[in-house]
Each structure stands twice: as C-alpha cells, then as structure tokens.
Amino acid sequence: MEPFLKEPGDFYRTIFIGHMDTVTKTLMGTEMNTQCDDRAEFFYQHVKTVTNAVQHRILRFWFHLELIFGWSKIGREEQRSLKECNEIIDQIYERKVNELNVMKAQGIDYLDKIKNENTANVTEKCLILEREGVFTHENALDQMRLMIIAGIDTSSITVFGTLLLLAINQKHQDAVVEELRSIFDSADCVVTHAQLANMQYLERVIKESMRLIPPIPIIGRKPSTDIDVPRGTIPKNAFVLINILHLHRNPKIWGENAIEFDPDRFLPENIAKRPPFSYIPFSGGARNCIGMKYAMISAKIVLANLLRRYKFTTHLKFEDIHLKTHVVLEVTNENALQIEERHFSTH
C-alpha cells in the first residue's frame, strides 16, 4: 500500500483546526466551518501566541507584576492576540443570542424549554445564568472564552499524542483497529454514543498516551492550610507546582518500564494497585477539569474516524520525541507522522 501523503506537514495544526469546529458545535451549538476558510489559521496563531506568552510570564518572576508585563513586547502581543480570539468567540456568542431573540419574538422561550429538559449546551447554560442574574454578561463571555480556547488545544494534543504513540507502537495500533472492526462494518459508519462504551481498548490507549504525553504538563495549587510532608511543611498560601509529566513517568509508581507504552496499565486490576493521585492528566480532587468526560468522548470519536481511514507511521522512536513544556504540552518534531490510506473493510 503506497502512502498517499508521506509528509503531511504540521498535522497538529490540522487536528487543531478540526477541533475548532467540533468544540464550537458541541459547546455553543454553532457551525463555524473554520476548516473551509482562513479564520482557522488566524485563530490558531493567536492561541499559540497567548499560550507562549503565559509560559514566558510564569518563568520570569519580574513579569508576574501586571504593570511590567503589560509594558513588555510579549505582553502587548498577548493582549492583541487575546483581543482577536475574544472577538471571534464573542461574535459566535452574539449570533446565538440573536437566534434566541428571533425565537422569543415568535413566542418560543427556548432557554426555559431546554432548562426544564436539562439539555442546554455550555453557551445556553451561560445565557440562562446571565438571564437569572447569576452571571454578568462579561462572566458569561469569560466562561465561553475559557472553555473554547482551553478545550481546543488540550483535545488536539491528546489526539496528536495518541496517534504518534500508536505510530511508534504498531502492534497497539493494529489492536485498536481490530477492536474498531468488531464495532463498525465500514470506515464510514457514524460513531454513536452506545458504541463509545465498546471502545475499551481505545480508551486504555488514550489514557496511556495521556500518561506519557499529558496535555497539561504542570499545574499550580495554593494550599488552604499548612501541609506536613516528609521533608518539612508546605505553608498555607504557598504557590505549589505539580509536575504531571514527571509524576506520570516516575519509576517508583509505574515500574522500571515506566516509559514503555502499555495500555494494560489501565486495566481495572492494575489501576487498583496504584495511589489514586498517581495519574492526573485532568488534575484531581475538587479542582479537576470539568471537561474530562467531554475530552474522552471527543478523543474516541476523532480517533475512531481517523484510524478506520488511515494508518499512521513515523520515523521516530519514543526517545526521539521532543517535548516543549508550555501551558499545553507541545511535540516539536517536524513531520512526525506519515499517513497511508487504510483498507478497513471487515469482509
């Protein structure tokens, strides 16, 4: 089988743009069709500017002061990019408001209806809370901006990282495809909610991928009380960084083969052997990620569609992967994935 696309370029960017449409459709109920116009590249570049600026600021204590950061070149670039991103999201929000106003004029209180049915998407929930006075208009917009910008980038690296690790570990890619063949008759079958529960091996693969390439490599926390640890005390209100990337590769937890790709680590009997907070790709506890269920569902759907249609290969070994520790982890290898058309037929 000859590769139809040996050098797909920045495949991560392609996945990112696809997730823009997915996230805006599911969270906001709006068709953006960004894959068909120039807004996607525009949005992608601005999101990268913002995440790079955040990381740059975290690592330089003098930029923690708002005044100094605001005057800096990177601070001004961040503000310009945030403004551009926010304008795109705000336009989508206002479009939704206008649609609801038209329905209201026709005597249809759509927000009241979906509230009673508990079927509101994130945008609609924000609108309901704004109408009830729980959110200000700016509160509602801030929630949408955060959900979209954070959701697209983290979902994209989850899918990209999984494809890269499956390209390195072909036997596991073959096993995922066999599972998909047991579920679908063809590559064109639409993924249903009921079928997601049958993708158990794919789910273990995604979890193992997020262990080795966690979307968020580092998180910060502020203790609400003093915490005694073996080598001293973490004082109340200290700023604590938790290195998820290193935690997920710690041989004391994961064994001497900690950097080997093994989805069976996430069989129930193996999960039970580990401390509950040894695996935290979505953080943990009361401040964990509110989008973790959505992220898993989204990753399963995207990967099930891609792996039924294409075979992914790479010239890289695991130790060749170059990671850049930003707010969202980045794989910096160029042309990391090669793609071939897959003959998926189950017959």
Image (cartoon, helix red, strand yellow):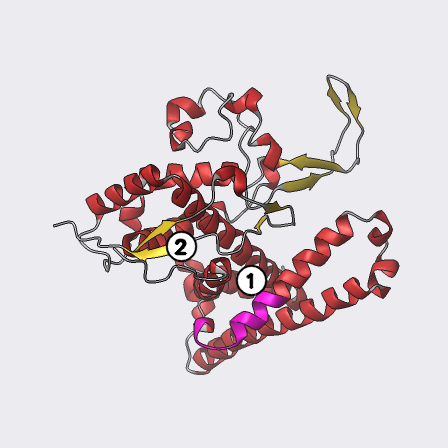
Query: Is residue 226 positioned above or below 316 on the image?
Result: above
Question: Within 10 Å of the Cα at label 2, are there few (<14), some (14-19), or many (20+) other Cα atoms?
Answer: many
Q: Position of residue 216 (x, y in %)?
A: 59, 45
Q: Position of residue 301 (x, y in %)?
A: 35, 53
Q: Position of residue 230 (x, y in %)?
A: 73, 16
* The residue positioned farthest toward the left in the image shown: 347
Mark nearer the viewer, 2 or 1: 2
Question: Within 10 Å of the Cα at label 1, are there few (<14), some (14-19), or many (20+) other Cα atoms?
Answer: many
Q: Which residue is mark 1?
A: 126
Q: Which residues are magenta?
A: 35-45
| Element under disc 1 | helix
106 or 163: which is nearer to us? 163
On whether residue 196 falls in the magenta region, the answer is: no
Q: On the rendered image, what quadrant is the N terminus found in? A: bottom left
Residue type at mark 1 is Cys
- Residue in the picture at 54% in, 70% down: 41
**Which labelled disc corresponds to residue 286?**
none
- Residue in the picture at 21% in, 50% down: 184
Q: Which residue is mark 2?
A: 338
- Give the quarter of the image for residue 114: bottom left
- Give the quarter of the image for residue 78: bottom right
On whether residue 44 falls in the magenta region, the answer is: yes
Count the numbered circles shown.
2
Residue 139 visible from this viewpoint: no
Q: Position of residue 195 (x, y in %)?
A: 27, 47
| Element under disc 2 | strand
Residue type at mark 2 is Gln
Would residue 192 appear left or right of 90 to someone viewing this image?
left
- Give the quarter of the image for residue 187: bottom left
